[in-house]
Image: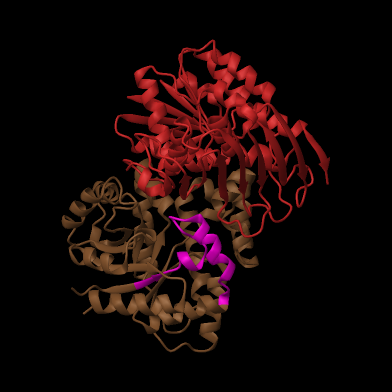
Chain colours: A red, B brown
């Protein structure tokens, strides 16, 4: 059994606590948040859990195997390095992005080397059936040599000036807050890019960007466009879409479905022609469903790794590559309007 | 087979689609309050006798117009209250203070005065159950002020994320208090939307909540779509829950099976009392509800 503590009683903290509590053989023992109002309310509503306003106190008083860090990205470095310094055997699941900037992410990578715990970052799109199938096709070179891609993640979340940590320069903005899942998928599929040229725009937010457009050069001549924006009309719910073209086919994948066109067979895998896959048909049943099945799948993966002493694929080093790409995009921005 | 109620679900009318975000966005482009109102009325004319919806301003504006025109048909209300998603967004962007601002924002000026002076924000911390029930009462009151004269509140349904969090984190007192509060205040059964039906039934047994005292709305379809952990276990739970008030939702598995397939599957089961289905056009409403009425309610 894995005993878990959760830092952050926001939406993601409650979500992970709910899922872990539902999985047989695992237990959430404690949660903490610096907002004392939330902690006082939570104590009344969730009497089976222990609550703290200080994660250091939680670590001292509770016997934990793993901690989920579900706080804003700006706080990740201090929390994670404190926990590693206190308990080098503690396993850590950190919500994406790993850190608010690349330097902090790399310091966390170095800190993780001092630990024997298992480290994972919450890029749960890798557990979405259609994105996993896309990776399979790319691994088999189904499209032939890759030529071009275009992708976007767009939403209508920000249509007026808004306050909060997501709109502060050091902790927010569309690229850092909204882009990581898409950027992680791109790195997963194509490797880290060689160079990036971008521009970004402010529509409603004064301190942070609401939109960024990037031209990305990857290895082997692959080039593509990336659009990240949270102020687009008629994108509720949001859309994450990737279109990839190769010498022998193309594919278009969103969170709903994957459509593949191939002009040749891929032996042992798929015949030439047009194929459509629905995400529901590619996603296994889960023991407990909260929002989307990939959240349960990622938590199961992490807890299995902790129990089996295996390192998850989405470790800090992998996650830091996303922060590096974010940095490349931000530093390459030529125009701000 | 003769079920109790045939309910129109509002998801397609409010841009929610559990299978296709693209379809949800496409619909949202074309739906406006007038066309949504026509779909609702078409569904009622074709045999629907209830409406399941969230507390959004467009729905309330439609109710207001129907009330003004003295809409003649009787129908039941199955609202999902309180609106936790907005609170959830407030938590994420502004923390707990965002929640307080959001809660206060929903109140009238006199309610705010009471909240701040009489019980104060300390109610939230000293007795969050009472505070949440009070918030529910405000939302029910806001709803009752706009509904047509012949509309009847049949239940208030807890949003699925809330139900499933409550059952996993075992908020026994909160749930029992909610059930009691709804029954005593409104004389109706409290409802719960869940995608973890077998676990929720077990949770109710552990809490000592008789299934006949509540309403459960849960996905039931031939593909087992969102029937967690499996279609087979959900079917078995249904068989063992004779006295439960079950509303089957997602009967078309997000549009992946035909209406005829859905009907055949539902007819093979025992234990369902009502069906909830969403449509997005008047023609679709007429076809769907006429067929369901003939097949499941005769």
Quadrant hosting residue B242: bottom left
Residue B269 figure quarter: bottom left
A201 and A7: which is toward the camera: A201
Q: Is residue A294 above or below residue A221?
A: below
Q: Is residue B130 left or right of residue B201?
A: right
Indicate the quadrant where residue A34 lies.
top right
| Horizontal and vertical percent position of residue B35 | 54, 78
Q: Check the image and report above or below for A228 versus B42.
A: above
Residue A313 rendering spot, x and y as whole percentages: 47, 24
Q: Residue furthest front?
A: A264
Residue at the top extreme, as displayed: A114
| Residue at the spot 22% in from the left edge and 63% down from the top edge | B265
Q: Is residue A234 above or below residue A249?
A: below
**Residue B171, horizontal then vertical, whole percent:** 37, 45
Is residue A47 visible from the viewing direction of this image?
no
Residue B153 in picture, x, y percent from top left: 40, 73
B261 vs A257, left or right, is left
- Whether residue B215 sits left or right of residue A170 in the image: it is left
Quarter containing the N terminus of chain A: top left
**Magenta segment boundaries in residue numbering:** B7-33
Magenta stretch encompasses residue B18:
yes
**Horizontal arrangement in the rendering, residue B87 relative to residue A329 (left or right):** left
Determine the residue positioned at 30% across, 29% down: A25
A48 relative to B144, above or below:
above
Frontmost residue, B184 versus B278: B278
| Closer to the camera in the image, B33 or A276 | A276
Residue A253 among magenta residues: no
């Amino acid at each position: 059994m894995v005993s878990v503590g959760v830092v952050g009683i926001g939406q993601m903290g409650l979500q992970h606590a709910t899922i872990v509590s539902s999985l047989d053989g695992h237990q959430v023992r404690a949660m903490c948040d610096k907002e004392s109002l939330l902690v006082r309310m939570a104590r009344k509503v969730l009497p089976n859990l222990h609550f703290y306003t200080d994660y250091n106190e939680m670590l001292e008083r509770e016997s934990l195997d793993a901690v989920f860090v579900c706080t804003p990205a700006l706080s990740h470095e201090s929390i994670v390095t404190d926990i590693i310094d206190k308990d080098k055997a503690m396993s850590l699941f950190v919500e994406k992005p790993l850190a608010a900037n690349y330097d902090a992410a790399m310091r966390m990578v170095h800190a993780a080397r001092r630990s024997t715990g298992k480290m994972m970052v919450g890029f749960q799109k890798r557990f979405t059936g259609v994105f996993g199938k896309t990776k399979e096709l790319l691994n088999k070179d189904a499209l032939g040599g890759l030529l071009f891609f275009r992708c976007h993640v767009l939403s209508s979340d920000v249509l007026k000036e808004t306050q909060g940590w997501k709109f502060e320069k050091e902790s927010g903005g569309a690229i850092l807050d909204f882009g990581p899942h898409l950027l992680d998928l791109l790195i997963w599929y194509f490797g880290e890019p060689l160079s990036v040229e971008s521009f970004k725009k402010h529509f409603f937010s004064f301190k942070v960007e609401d939109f960024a457009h990037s031209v990305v050069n990857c290895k082997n001549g692959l080039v593509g466009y990336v659009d990240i924006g949270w102020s687009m009309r008629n994108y509720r719910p949001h859309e994450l879409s990737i279109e990839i073209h190769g010498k022998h086919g193309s594919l278009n994948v969103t969170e709903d479905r994957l459509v593949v066109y191939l002009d040749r067979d891929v032996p042992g895998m798929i015949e030439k022609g047009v194929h459509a896959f629905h995400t529901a048909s590619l996603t296994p049943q889960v023991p407990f469903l909260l929002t989307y099945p990939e959240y349960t799948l990622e938590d199961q993966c992490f807890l299995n790794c902790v129990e089996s002493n295996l390192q998850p694929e989405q470790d800090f080093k992998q996650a830091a590559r996303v922060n590096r790409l974010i940095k490349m995009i931000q530093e390459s921005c030529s125009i701000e309007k | 087979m003769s079920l109790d109620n045939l309910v129109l679900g509002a998801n397609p009318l409010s841009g929610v689609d559990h299978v296709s975000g693209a379809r949800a966005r496409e619909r949202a482009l074309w739906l406006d309050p007038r066309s949504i109102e026509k779909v609702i009325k078409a569904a009622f004319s074709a045999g629907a006798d209830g409406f399941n919806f969230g507390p959004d301003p467009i729905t309330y504006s439609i109710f207001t117009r129907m009330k003004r025109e003295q809409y003649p048909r009787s129908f039941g209300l199955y609202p999902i209250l309180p609106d936790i998603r907005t609170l959830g967004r407030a938590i994420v962007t502004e923390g707990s203070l965002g929640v307080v601002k959001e809660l206060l924002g929903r109140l009238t000026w006199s309610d705010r005065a009471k909240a701040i002076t009489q019980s104060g924000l300390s109610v939230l911390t000293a007795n969050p159950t009472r505070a949440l029930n009070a918030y529910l009462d405000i939302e029910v009151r806001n709803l009752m002020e706009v509904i047509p004269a012949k509309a009847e509140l049949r239940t208030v349904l807890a949003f699925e994320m809330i139900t499933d969090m409550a059952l996993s984190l075992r908020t026994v007192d909160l749930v029992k208090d909610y059930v009691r509060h709804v029954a005593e205040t409104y004389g109706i059964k409290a409802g719960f939307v869940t995608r973890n039906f077998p676990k929720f039934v077990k949770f109710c047994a552990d809490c000592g909540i008789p299934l006949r005292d509540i309403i459960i709305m849960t996905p039931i379809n031939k593909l087992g779509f969102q029937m967690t952990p499996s279609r087979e276990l959900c079917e078995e739970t249904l068989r063992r829950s004779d006295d439960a008030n079950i509303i089957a939702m997602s009967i078309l598995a997000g549009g992946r099976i035909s209406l005829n397939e859905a009907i055949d599957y539902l007819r093979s089961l025992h234990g369902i009392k009502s069906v909830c289905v969403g449509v997005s056009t008047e023609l679709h409403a007429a076809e769907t509800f006429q067929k369901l009425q003939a097949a499941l309610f005769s």
